[in-house]
Image (cartoon, rainbow, N blue to C red):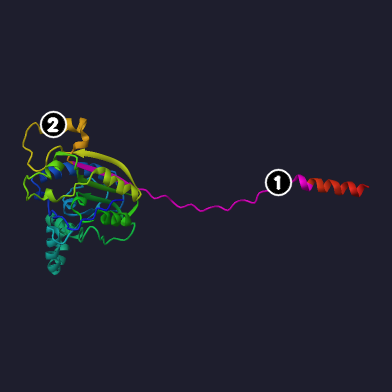
Amino acid sequence: MRTAFKAKPPRYPTSWDDFPAGEHIRGAVNTVCSDYAERIFGYHFAKLGALSAEINLNTSPIRHHINQVPFDNQFGRQLEGNAASNNTSDNNVATSHLQGESRELTTNRENNVVGQSHSLPFSENSIDGFLLANELDFAQDPHEILREVDRVITQNGYVIISGFNPLSLAGIAKFLPVKRGNILHDARFFTSYRIKDWLELMGFEIVEQRQVLFSTLFFQQRWKGAAKLQHYLASYFPWCSAVYVILAKKRVIPMTAIKPKRNLKPRFSAVGASVRTSTVNRTLR
């Protein structure tokens, strides 16, 4: 397997607003991820990265969601500020069930974890579902992140991964002198075939893949007829979409004990029979 380690880590986006068409990308990815999340059951769901934390999965049957974000993210700064005022927060928790806004803030604080995606603070076989919204595109070593996911995910757990497609207009524009300060120029742009190959090597089964957005992603979409063009391209040219979303399921083959072989009955021996016959004849004589 060809290594994907990058000596210089790419710039990491703190929000979808860092992209010119960030809100448009987030909406398209959110729609597919919400549909996939409805199929995942269990107790714990983890969203890795700043972009994943902004994906809304209210339709998910799993009620306990964990947002793991890096230290330099706005969620991380908010957590650090909340940690400095724990005494004040503890007094507000007692009455938070009467105030919707306070309850929402308390819930968000409890569900956020500050840390890196390549070092998950969870025990083995403890998370039922993962969401990596374009997290691998801005990772220095995506293999390390997937190995951590494989360690933590439960048997038959699910993982949702979205990424930028290099075989698209956005992949071509990445190498053009267009908006050089755009963070999209730092994205890794892995093909979906490569991501699926990594997952299959780790024992994941690819359940479904969808292609969304057919544009360069470097400009905001303002054309009124874009929706019809998107539908046409999705029907006849799905391979050139700017973003893909993959749903994979962890498969674990159970170990079966090897049963001992049964003792077989001795087969008929012609040599033994001839000896017995000759002995009987000698006795009769």
Query: Does 249 sit above or below residue 127?
Result: above
Q: CA distance from mark 2 to mark 1?
A: 77 Å
Q: Is residue 268 magenta?
A: yes
Label 2 vs 1, first from the N-terminus: 2
Q: Does residue 274 appear anywhere in the picture?
A: yes
Name the residue type under label 1. Answer: Arg
Packing grade of label 2 (10 A; few <14, some 14-19, many >=20) is few
Packing grade of label 1 (10 A; few <14, some 14-19, many >=20) is few
Q: Is residue 123 magenta?
A: no
Q: Secondary structure at mark 2?
A: helix
- Residue ID at (26%, 55%): 145
State the extent of the magenta-drawn residues as a range.
243-272
Name the residue type under label 2. Answer: Leu
Name the quadrant containing residue 8.
bottom left
Residue beneath disc 1: 267
Name the quadrant containing residue 98.
bottom left
In the image, taking residue 76 as reference, residue 66 lies left or right, namely right
Q: Secondary structure at mark 1?
A: loop
- Residue ID at (89%, 46%): 281
Residue beneath disc 2: 229
User: How many marks are shown on the rendered structure?
Assistant: 2
Percent x, y of residue 234: 19, 33
Percent x, y of residue 138: 18, 53
Q: Nearer the viewer, residue 243 or 57?
A: 243
Q: Are marks 2 and 1 in contact (CB under 8 Å)?
A: no
In the image, taking residue 213 as reference, residue 39 lies left or right, namely right
Percent x, y of residue 17: 9, 49
Query: Does 44 sit above or below residue 274?
Result: below
Q: Nearer the viewer, mark 2 or mark 1?
A: 1
Percent x, y of residue 62: 27, 50
- Which mark is on residue 73? none
